[in-house]
Image (cartoon, rainbow, N blue to C red):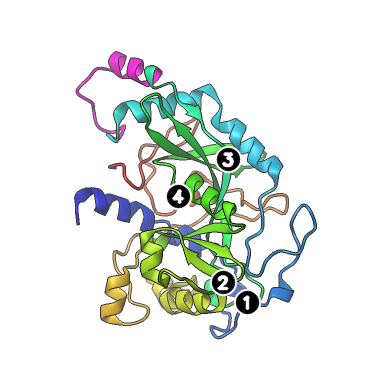
């Protein structure tokens, strides 16, 4: 595995702690054999239509608009410009050019938003545990695709903090927006299983793959929602909050190849357990969280004030 792949894997798998730690105490001790009950899932859509089986709670359009506006802040776009200008070199390392040259390169990149801000849904711990009525995923943050003059693309992550929206990460590429658009085109909802860096679409009661990792996970034809619940419970059911795995301070990482060798529930690439400082808010589908909670165990060494953290994930090198 290349250093670039290792960096990508480490950053993505680090989100395990934040994604699974959002489960309630009830979910942590739920009957593992239980399955989602569609009748128990309340109607929370703005239009009042019955949600699809297992579908995550939609994020209100007003929240997405506010997140979109936050990314349009000139300070944020300047940070994204520097992100493009540095071409993957983290802010903790110097470039071969000086600060003035970097600033000019950042300005020349002329970053601009492309498309809508989208919610990013992540595998829900309650669903993993088998909590009746739990959706397959929950909104973890929003993402806005930004493009540069030279064709580079980045995904700017935002979370709600109190009454405002804060940028907590800039990631190379536009996976979040691209997969959301691909899923919506067929009438489904995109969500991610960060432990294996897999993207899926929930459509008509089936979980279908959107990337290679997902195809490795569920096959090219996908699986039923019930079969997927059994699959992720087998993988992570013994790693939820309150489990021995959690009490030992481990949290993160799962390799499909390791699981095949060691049997169900095998874990690899353990990372420090993050302690989310999050509390769900009834006014939004996205919890009001701190930057550290939103990024799980990812270090915030490069985080600054104002627009928030500028961190690399996926293809960029940290």
The region drawn magenta spans 90-107
Q: Earlier in the sequence, mark 2 or mark 1?
A: 1
User: At which x and y percent is residue 221?
Assistant: 45, 71
Q: Secondary structure at mark 1?
A: loop
Q: Is residue 98 magenta?
A: yes
Figure label count: 4
Instruction: Tell me the quarter of the image containing the C terminus.
Output: top left
Per the image, the residue denoted by label 3 is 117
CA distance for labels 4 and 3: 18 Å
User: At which x and y percent is residue 123?
Assistant: 51, 63
Instruction: Please rate how many residues cluster around mark 4, counting C-alpha atoms within 10 Å: few if below 14, some from 14 to 19, many from 20.
Output: many
Q: Is residue 56 magenta?
A: no
Instruction: Tell me the quarter of the image containing the N terminus.
Output: bottom left
Please give the name of the residue rendered at 41% of the width and 75% of the height, measured from the top-left corner: 235
Per the image, the residue denoted by label 4 is 295
Q: Earlier in the sequence, mark 3 or mark 1?
A: 1
Per the image, the residue denoted by label 2 is 127
Q: Earlier in the sequence, mark 4 or mark 3?
A: 3
CA distance for labels 2 and 4: 21 Å
User: At which x and y percent is residue 96?
Assistant: 19, 23
Q: Secondary structure at mark 2?
A: helix
Are circles 2 and 1 on residues that touch, CB within 8 Å? yes
């Amino acid at each position: 595995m290349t250093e670039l792949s290792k960096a990508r894997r480490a950053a993505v798998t680090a989100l395990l702690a934040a994604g699974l730690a959002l489960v309630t105490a009830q979910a942590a001790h739920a009957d593992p054999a239980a399955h989602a009950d569609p009748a128990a899932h309340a109607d929370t859509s703005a239009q009042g239509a019955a949600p699809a089986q297992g579908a995550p709670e939609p994020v209100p359009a007003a929240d997405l608009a506010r997140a979109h506006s936050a990314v349009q802040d000139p300070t944020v776009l300047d940070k994204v410009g520097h992100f493009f200008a540095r071409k993957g070199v983290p802010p903790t390392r110097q470039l071969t050019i000086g600060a003035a040259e970097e600033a000019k390169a950042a300005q020349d990149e002329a970053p601009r938003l492309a498309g809508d801000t989208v919610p990013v849904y992540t595998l829900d711990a309650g669903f993993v545990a088998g909590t009746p009525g739990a959706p397959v995923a929950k909104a973890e943050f929003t993402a806005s695709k930004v493009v540069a003059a030279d064709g580079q693309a980045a995904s700017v992550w935002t979370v709600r903090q109190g009454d405002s929206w804060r940028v907590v990460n800039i990631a190379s590429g536009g996976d979040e927006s691209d997969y959301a658009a691909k899923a919506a085109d067929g009438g489904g909802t995109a969500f991610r299983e960060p432990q294996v860096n897999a993207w899926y679409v929930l459509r008509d009661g089936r979980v279908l793959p959107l990337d290679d990792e997902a195809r490795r996970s569920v096959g090219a034809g996908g699986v039923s929602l019930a079969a997927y619940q059994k699959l992720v419970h087998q993988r992570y059911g013994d790693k939820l909050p309150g489990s021995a795995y959690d009490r030992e301070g481990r949290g993160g990482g799962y390799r499909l190849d390791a699981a095949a060798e060691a049997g169900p529930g095998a874990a690899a690439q353990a990372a420090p357990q993050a302690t989310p400082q999050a509390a769900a808010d009834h006014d939004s589908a996205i919890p009001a969280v701190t930057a550290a909670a939103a990024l799980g165990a990812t270090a915030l060494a490069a985080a600054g004030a104002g627009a928030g953290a500028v961190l690399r994930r996926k293809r960029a090198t940290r």
